[in-house]
Amino acid sequence: MKHAITGALVTLAAMGLGLFWYQGRAEVEEAAPPPDLSSLLIEDASPEGLPIADAADMIGPTPPEASELTKEQQRFFRYDRDRDWRISRTEMLSTRSAAFRKLDKDGNNLLTFEEWAVTTVDKFEGADANGDNELTPGEFATTRPKPKKRKARCAC
């Protein structure tokens, strides 16, 4: 009930503020001077006094062309974060550091074959629902990365 009353009061206050704002704009527009009609009158309205324009001889500016990036250029710019046309070691490794930390089970910043293999085998076995050591398209679809969870906007 408290929220309903607060909402009603806020709505009434917003409507009152809008009404005063609208009336204030209306008064300013009423007091504005009328436009000067003498500048709008055409002195010579005869056809001889009008400018002639033949659009057939006119050429407009060429429209801008979008630069098409090749797939290799797109892949390059995915790593080149500061767009200096050079990929530093930090830029190259930054995109994979989170995945590397997940695979490095003992946290020694060295990824051994065993650490990689255990993770890969676990992922395969988790997806192989029928245990036939082969993945069907449906089973393979379960290995897709999970979507990121969205945070709640309001905890009201």
Image (cartoon, rainbow, N blue to C red):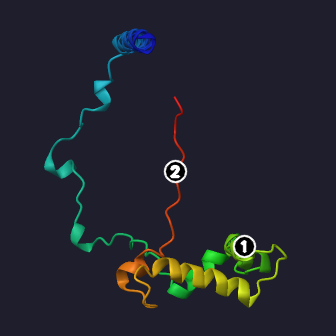
Mark linked to residue 138 = none
User: In the image, residue 39 lies at what x, y percent?
Assistant: 32, 31
User: In the image, residue 141 lies at what x, y percent?
Assistant: 41, 77
Say whether marks 2 and 1 touch (CB < 8 Å): no
Whether 45 is drawn above or below 33: the answer is below
130 relative position to 45: left or right:
right
Q: Residue at 39% of width from left, 70% of height from top? A: 61
10 Å crowding of disc 2: few (<14), some (14-19), many (20+): few
Whether 119 is drawn above or below 150: the answer is below
Q: Residue 74 lies in what quarter of the image? A: bottom right
Secondary structure state at the residue bearing disc 2: loop
Whole-number angstrom distance, CA of label 2 to CA of label 1:
22 Å
Secondary structure state at the residue bearing disc 1: helix
Mark 2: which amino acid? Arg
Q: Which residue is mark 1?
A: 97
Whether 33 is drawn above or below 119: the answer is above
Q: Residue at 69% of width from left, 72% of height from top? A: 102
Of 151 and 61, nearer the camera is 151
Of 114 and 23, nearer the camera is 114
User: In the image, residue 23 lies at what x, y percent?
Assistant: 37, 9
Which of the two discs, 2 and 1, labels the residue nearer the N terminus? 1
Q: Residue at 29% of width from left, 70% of height from top? A: 58
Number of callouts: 2
User: In the image, residue 144 lies at what x, y percent?
Assistant: 47, 74
Mark 1: which amino acid? Ser
Image quarter (top left, top right, bottom left or bottom right) of the N terminus:
top left
43 relative position to 10: left or right:
left
Of 123 and 63, nearer the camera is 123
85 relative position to 136: left or right:
right
94 relative position to 18: left or right:
right
Q: Which residue is mark 2?
A: 150
